[in-house]
Image (cartoon, grey):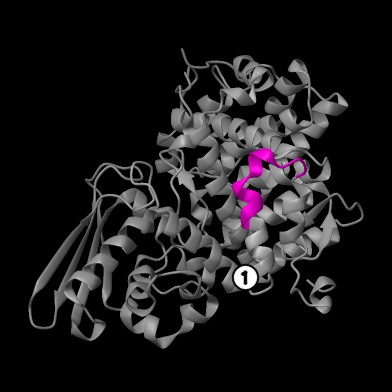
Amino acid sequence: MGLKTTREIADYVHDFKYEQLPSDLVSHVKDIVSGYMSSTLAGSILPIGRVATAYARQQASSQQAGVFGGGFKTTLEAAAAANATMAHATELEDVAFPEGLYTLTVLAPVFAIAEHQRMTGREAIEAFVLGYEVAGKLGVACADAGAKGWMLSAVFASVGNAAAAARLFKLDREQTLNAISIGASQGTGLVKQAGMGAHTFEAGFAARNGICAATLAKLGLDGAPGILEGVGGMADLIGGMPDFELVEGFRTAEIGIRKYPCCGLLQRTIDGMSDLIAAEKLTIDAVESIEVEVNHTFAMYMKYADPRTAAQTRFSIEHAMAACFIEQPVFLASFTDEAAHDPRYAAIRRKVTMKVHPEWERGYFPQPAIITVTKKDGTVLKRECVFARGDAGHPASREDIGGKYQGAIDFVGVLSQEQADKASRIIETLDDIEDVSELTTIFAFPDQLKASERKVA
């Protein structure tokens, strides 16, 4: 039987043992951590990452946890908020569907707390899994709300992060219940923000909220013990589910590894277009037009036919299709402010049309996206895009996982190869590491960050 009440969820979090984690799940988590660490560092040099760093620096009166790429420490809440936001700025986060929960928004508070308290890798892995399970399973229960415009990752991550923080703070059973309840009062997120800085910061808000909730619970603040269930509970208000039963099994095992630094809905279309280009030796000069057929949910996110910022390029099917012709493999350089204004991208974007089928079932992936390329000689090429390589069930290769890590490190250019390799080795043995600050310090204080950059956001 799945969990049905706030108290049952709190008991699960309080009583969980690391030994319950399968070894293959621990290995999967380490791959996810690899992507989180490198993409957060890469996000530190993006415009929104600079804002997140400046925000964290203003809170730096208490030096508790490091800000990746910043060269300084700040409060737990500010570090978690900044690191989650910087990771999300790249859109390289790994995600499970249908909950659409980003791993980064759970990893950021987990590693901030674990760093400050000098905790073991096992404790960090355990807390991450618990936080992801709580938030992810609530997201599955309320999945239909995502199609209505709730950004479920941000909504339920505040709850999951409260559970993860409660575990790391070693709260008792009642304090854990209160932390989850307080987290629920802070959870929100809106799809309508996609492509704007506020959307990126929603991941940071959720990271911050979980630490805040657990801290307040530790100090004695209480919350309604049945906040998630029943009429007027969180699941009812968000998803119309007053009586829910959380799915069994580990949602963490369903997390896919994302290859491209853009919205998860674009991943399979980039694979599909890239495959067409390779198979047909297709050049953009030979292309008259490109049509991508999608459902209403896809169109809710892809709002920017002519993006003006890096954030907007990550929610543009037109830009993603252009990137396939300009950069192979598609990666971070294609989703920058410079790329948004690059005439080469603009010219290709004008050839791309998104055709929305309002009659198609709503949701993230209920049917394939269909790409139709019409060549100037009249030839028509079609590709049905069913899944992305790296999705759950279609695992990313070791080459893809390593390439994502190294590509992000190379993009930001503040970490030497020696230190990048050292960090990679630590991640590979994370479950044996006695103090995770050994890992986080490498990314918070990269060895090629200029002294001047340590002082100015």
- Crowding near the residue tagged with mark 1, few <14, some 14–19, many ≥20 C-alpha atoms within 10 Å: some
Q: Residue at x 38, y 42 (%)?
A: 392
Q: Position of residue 312 (x, y in %)?
A: 49, 67
**Is the residue 444 above or below the residue 111 in the image?**
below
Q: Secondary structure at mark 1?
A: loop
Left or right, 266 with respect to 173, comes to left
Picture quadrant where residue 353 is located: bottom left
Q: Which region of the structure is painted magenta?
A: 424-435
- In the image, 410 versus 207, the foreground residue is 410
Q: Residue at x 32, y 80 (%)?
A: 348
Q: Position of residue 380 (x, y in %)?
A: 10, 71
Q: Can you name the residue that lies furthest to the right here?
A: 61
Left or right, 445 with respect to 376, comes to right
Screen quadrant of the C terminus: bottom right
* Residue that numbered label 1 is attached to: 46
Residue 427 counted in the magenta span: yes
Q: Position of residue 263 (x, y in %)?
A: 44, 57
Residue 185 visible to the viewer: no
Three-letter residue code for mark 1: Leu
- In the image, 187 versus 391, the foreground residue is 391
Q: Residue at x 39, y 60 (%)?
A: 302
Left or right, 228 with respect to 220, comes to left
- In the image, 337 versus 43, the foreground residue is 43
- In the image, 201 versus 118, the foreground residue is 118
Residue 188 counted in the magenta span: no
